[in-house]
Each structure stands twice: as structure tokens, then as C-alpha cells.
Amino acid sequence: MAGRWQRSSRPLAWRLAGVALVAAALTPSVQAAMPASSGVDCTQLAEEDEPDSASAWYERSLWASHCYAFQARAVRIGSDGVRALAMSHGIEDGVERERARYLDGPAVAFEREGRIARPGGMTSSASSAAPPEAIVEHLDGLYRLQLSGSDRIAGRHAMRLDIEPLDDQRYGHRLWLDANTALPLKKMLLDEQGRVIETFQITDLRAPRLHQGAIDLASPPSLPALSWRPDWLPRGFVPQAIATQGGRRPGIEHRVYGDGLSTLSLFVEPLEGRSLLIPGIHRLGVSRAAVMHRELGGRPCQVVAMGELPSRVLQRVVESVTWQADAQAGASDADER
């Protein structure tokens, strides 16, 4: 049974859950704005032929999510009920600006400003999020992409794309893409048994406009060194660069891993003088969180793995975390033997 968060930890828990829920409603996003030296010309989308395969449709949808300016209304249906959202996406001076906010229930808003990451991110074990073509290439061998007919969503003709995981370490997805722009109009998240656990759907897409110009490419960021590492991650998950987040308590080390569709956030912090979370599996809307108290580097620590992944996967990740110095010492001892 899923545990409950302790009262003293609820601000942290709800902050994580709120960001995760809104971010999941949007398509895969790039990282915070960084210096760039070149860009991608969005006008080329209008000149390309209609995609002829599931992977081509998905790649086109990722580019469309960067290159189209639009405003929209949407609904998200999850375990916490039905929530309405207002969304907008624009491009100014080659930089994307994206906003989303809930229109009912607790006030939660999400804003992002950034550039598309450079090629190669998904193929490196220590680099940033990748541009669309690299994401699609990375998905090969992790998911099966298949076109499954068409439908009518938000008054627009849409192509249905089924994305089925090839193992039991991640969730499946169904996407409905606007046949004209390839913008995502509807998304379903499915658990290991194929049950729908969340639906996100645009109900009103207002005059999407293709950006007439370039979007900047970001310089490859460097990932900060950590005092720990996970010795096991689901196949295909690699480190992702993230924007610096203000308001986090000192001493918390955080890293995000992703496979191009799913993400996993891993937090490690010392226990001394902290508000503790109850060890076990917790539900945060559509996400799950595995919490464990462990000794790392000779001190008690709290390890939290959170994401839209099966509970047993998150649990295995937190159990695998090792202190870097301990791991290096163990390797040296093995070499001497």
C-alpha cells in the first residue's frame, strides 16, 4: 500500500507533485536558456512532405512543439479528478517561452524559457536533453511506435500514435497529433497492464502559427559533480541537464534522468535537522515516489526517486544509490585482489 507523506514534509511533496503534473501535460521540453551560436529554421517544416511512418510523425510533433506559437485550453484527467488548464507557447528572439496554469482547484503554474539542446544529448551518458531527431533515435529499442488510425480531437483531424514499451520498466503512451501541424492534441499514459492512468487533452487550439525564423540551439551544459551515484537505472535512462531551481534547501543534491519519453528525479539529502519523509512508496498524482533512509558516506541520508514509472523500478533505483568514494574504494580493493 502506498504510504502517506508526513505533515512536516508536505510543502516539498506538493511542490514536486505540482511541477511534475503540469510539466507532464506538456510535450518534452528543453532546458533553461543558455548561450547559443546557431539555430534551427522553423520555416522548413512547411516545406516538408507529410510523415510516412510512426517515428517520422513523432519527430515532426517534437519539432512542431518548438516551432508553433499558439494558445490553448486543455483538461487533465487523473487520480485527483479533472483539472482545466490554460496554455501558451511563443518564440521571441529565437527563444521559446511557454506557460501553463490550472484554472480550477489549487493554483499551480508552470513557466519555461529556453533553447533547443544541441544534437547528441541522448547518446551521451552525461549530457543534456536532446533535439527531436536524437530523441527518436534513442527511443529505438526502448519503445515500439505504431500508427493506429485517425480521430477527431478539439474539432481537428488527428493521427493516433501508439508508443508501447519493449520492457516492463516504463509506461506506455498514446498520442493524437494534429494532422495539419503535428502538434499533440491528446495524450494518454498507460501503466504496465495497459490501464489509462492519466489523460491530457487540448479542447481548444487557437490559430497555431508557424514561427517564421530560427530557434536558437543551446550550448551543451556541464552537469555538476555529485557525491553519490545510482548503480542501476532502467535501460536507456541517461542524465539530463536541468535548470537551476531556487528555493531548494541547502544540502539537497538532485539529478534528473530520462529515456526520451519518461523522466526520473533522484534526490539525496542528509537527515540531520531535516523534515523526514516516511520510507516506502508514495503517490503524487500520476507520479510515484520511493523513499528510503540509508547511510551514505558514513552519515544517514534520505534518498527519494520520483517519476511516472512503476513503483518497483523507483524502489530499485533508491536501493542502488552508492556513495562515490565508497564505490571507488571498492573498485580499488577489487583491483588489488
Image (cartoon, rainbow, N blue to C red):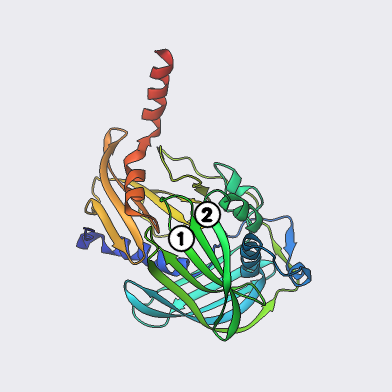
- On the picture, is 77 further left or further right than 133? left
Residue beneath label 2, please?
Answer: 143
Q: CA distance from mark 2 to mark 1?
A: 8 Å
Which amino acid type is shown beneath numbered disc 1? Gly
Which of these two is toward me, 316 or 291? 316
- Residue 253 percent location from the top left of the image: 40, 47
* Outermost residue toward the front in this view: 149
Residue at 49%, 70% (x, y): give it: 187
* Outermost residue toward the right in this view: 47
Res 252 visible: no
Mark toward the start of the polypeptide (2 vs 1): 2
Q: Dot 1: within a 10 Å radius of its alpha carbon, few (fewer than 14), some, or many (20 or more) residues?
A: many
Res 153 visible: yes
Which of these two is toward me, 264 or 247? 264
Residue at 36%, 44% (x, y): give it: 317
- On the picture, is 4 further left or further right than 240? left
Residue beneath label 1, please?
Answer: 172
For residue 150, above or below residue 94 = below
Do the residues under discs 2 and 1 have CB atoms within 8 angstroms?
yes
Q: Secondary structure at mark 2?
A: strand
Q: Dot 2: within a 10 Å radius of its alpha carbon, few (fewer than 14), some, or many (20 or more) residues?
A: many
- Residue 217 percent location from the top left of the image: 68, 57
Quadrant that contains the C terminus: top left
